[in-house]
Each structure stands twice: as C-alpha cells, then as structure tokens.
Amino acid sequence: MRTIKADAIVVGSGPSGAAAAKRLSDAGYEAVILERQALPRHKPCSGIVSPRGHRFLIENFGPLPEETMHAPQYCRGVVFHFPSAPSLPMEFDGGPTPHLYRKFCDNWMARRSGAKIHAGTEFTGLEDDGKKVTVSARKDGEELRYEARCVIGADGPRLGVVKALYPGYAQSIPWFVVGQKFHAIKSCPLDEDYFHFWFHPGLGHYTWSHARDGRQIVGVGFKSGDAFDPRHARVTGYLRERHGVELGPGEDTEIVTANFGPSLINRYVFGKGNALITGQAAGFFNMIAEGMSCALHSGAIAGEAAAESFRRGTDMQSLYRGMIQSEVRRCSDQWNPLKIAFGRPHEADFRGALKKKAPAERRAIARDIFSFIKLYAPLGWGWQMLRQALLRAVTGRYSPSRWL
C-alpha cells in the first residue's frame, strides 16, 4: 500500500475544502485535497452566492472567469412569496452577486488553492493517534494511505469524516430531500434577476425558482421519506395558477439529501482531536439555503486554525472552536427570530422591505411566516431556536456546549 505524506488532508474539493486548503497553502503548509469524483465534477446547486461570499472569492481567489457563471450572470436579490400576502422583493446589500456555475467554479477554486488535488480518490476512514492522522482512501480499486498532521472534513452532506468520528451521527439527525427540475419557459412573469422563495406550508419546507441558461429551475425540499415527483408537480401547478408561470415538462432532475437543521438550533459538529469538520458537513447553512458563503468562511477558519496550531504547537481543536464562534454567530443569527425581528442578520433588508408594506399587509406576511414555521414543529426545533435566541441575547454567543 502506498503511503503519501502531507501537512494536511482536506476531504472534499467544494468551497469549504478549497478555502481551507488555500489558507494552509498561503501559510506555507502542504495540503492535499481528496475528491472522490473526477474534476470538474457536477454539483447540484442554485448557484446563488451572497455578497459576502462574492467578496471572499474575489479577495482570496481573484476575479471570476467567464466560465464560472451561468446566465443571467448576476442575481439582484431575493423575492419572498406568501400564500395570502403580497410578494416581498429585496435587493442584496452592495448590489448584484454572481450566479455561479458550480461545476467550473468549484474546480477553479480548487486549482487556485495551491493544494495538490487527488481527484477520483474516495475517503474511506481515519485514525488519529494524537500526533498524526492516518487517512485511508481508495482510487481505481487501489487502497491508499495518507499520513498528515490533521484532516479537514469538507465533504458536505456525505459526512465521510463525520461518520468516521461519530458513527451514529447520521442516524441521529433529520434529513431532507432537496430536488429540482429544469423547464423550458413558455411564459414566466417571475423576474429572472431574482431568486424566488415561497413561504407556503402546502408546497414544502423549502420551495424556490429562478432562471438559468434560458430555462427555469423549479425546486422543492421536504422531509426525507416523501416522493419527489408529486411534490414537484404540486409546485409547478401552484406557480401556474398563482403566478401565471407556463413551463414545459421538467427535465434533468437533480435530487440530493441535505443535513438541514444544525445551524437553526446550534447543534454543529466540529470534530475531535486533529480532525476538523467545516462547511455544510459541520452544519453551516444560511437562510434561503445559500451555503457557499458560510462554507467559504468556515473552511478558511479551519485552515487558519490548523496552520496556527502547526506554527504554535497548540491544541488544534480548542483553537478551531474558539475561532469558529464568529461564523456560528453570523450563520445562526440568520435563523434567530429575535435577530430577524429586531436586528439585521441578512444581506437583504427584510425589515426595510417589510416597512414599505401597509400595516394589513405586514400582518398577513407575519401570519403566513408563522404558518410556514409550524411545518418544523414535529422536529422540535421551535423551542430550541427560541431558547438559543434568548441565550444569544443574554450571553452574546451561542453555547459551544451543544457542539460535537
């Protein structure tokens, strides 16, 4: 069995993995990215990135090449739609942001990270003896062995590194199915410069639509266990009846599972010993399910923590958990009902847009949002969210005692 040595092994070549590898490489350490697929690889995703994520890309990786964006190339903001209230358009702070073509954008980031990329290589396990981490992997049927000072799990909802550390974790959390289809456009009054999201309990836990490369994406997310096609058909029927959206048959179905929830209730998983977990694998997921910006920033923090631990000889896990609190606050604040009501945690001005509505319209929007939130009641998240919001108000942070 071949043994490959490096300072750090990063599992996953998405935004969080590329950002972690970039920080390590910039600090002078050798990082190896393990990616189970050949690059560039397809990535089901809306492609909408927040202004904060856009700034990070430019500052850390440089101007975006043409090939890394879909058409329309930019998104002006989001529109919230309600079953019994007027729609609420909101532009992003700082102007439009890119509509990323993840297949090519992720590949571009990984290539510019400075790390060695071992594509077609699947992570299969790890051992941490306190001084080094031994990672096992497989490529084209060959078993490989890596030795490094740390491993960073950045493989999204696959949770490969998480499962190696906590074998029962994946069975302990609720999972959601998130799927989308692409449609030829016959008639679509929805503004193509915006990402559209529906607070409608009859459609699903997460329902969206936006334009891409001459077609319209219609997507729906729901608790794992239900069938996708009937759910999707219900959404397209609603868009036709409520918004006059006429589309061709759905094509190119994309379905993924998502570990949606840790950021709402502050139940992140950050690893143990010399194994750090970051990005969506750790539980980061922004409002409207924009995960790229928090993946980029949390990945960078993981890389910084590893590099700082190498340099100072300090405990890596303690260092990471201290540094990651800033991203926990930023991400969980977006779901915090007190922050939403009295602050401005998002990069689109919800409160400002709401104030422009008449009092009766504001009340209708509030009722619709409350009805939508009740979808999550069976998960027991409501009281947990409120409890975490109150603790945040009193202590100024979210308690690390709830993290794995």
Image (cartoon, rainbow, N blue to C red):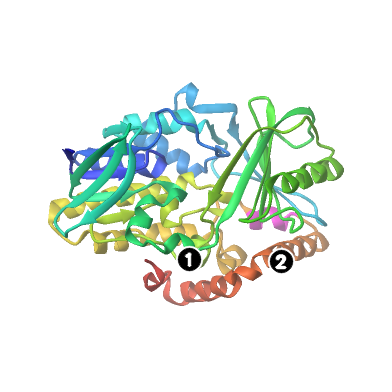
Query: Where's the C terminus, which quadrant?
Result: bottom left
In the depicted view, which residue is nearer to us: 18 or 120?
120
Q: Is residue 294 at all visible to an observer of this figure?
A: no
Q: Amino acid at mark 2?
A: Phe
Magenta segment, principal secondary structure? Answer: helix
Residue 367 x, y percent position in the rendering:
76, 65
Which span is picked out in magenta? Answer: 350-356
Residue 267: where, in percent of width, then height? Answer: 45, 66
Q: Which residue is mark 2?
A: 370
Q: Examine the rendered structure and indicate whether residue 204 appears above or below residue 296.
A: below
Residue 151: x and y in percent read 26, 49
Q: Secondary structure at mark 2?
A: helix
Q: Give the numbered dot on residue 172.
A: 1
Query: Is residue 1 inside the magenta stretch?
Result: no
Residue 264: x and y in percent read 53, 63
Q: Which SS class for mark 1? A: helix
Q: Amino acid at mark 1?
A: Ser
Residue 251 visible: yes
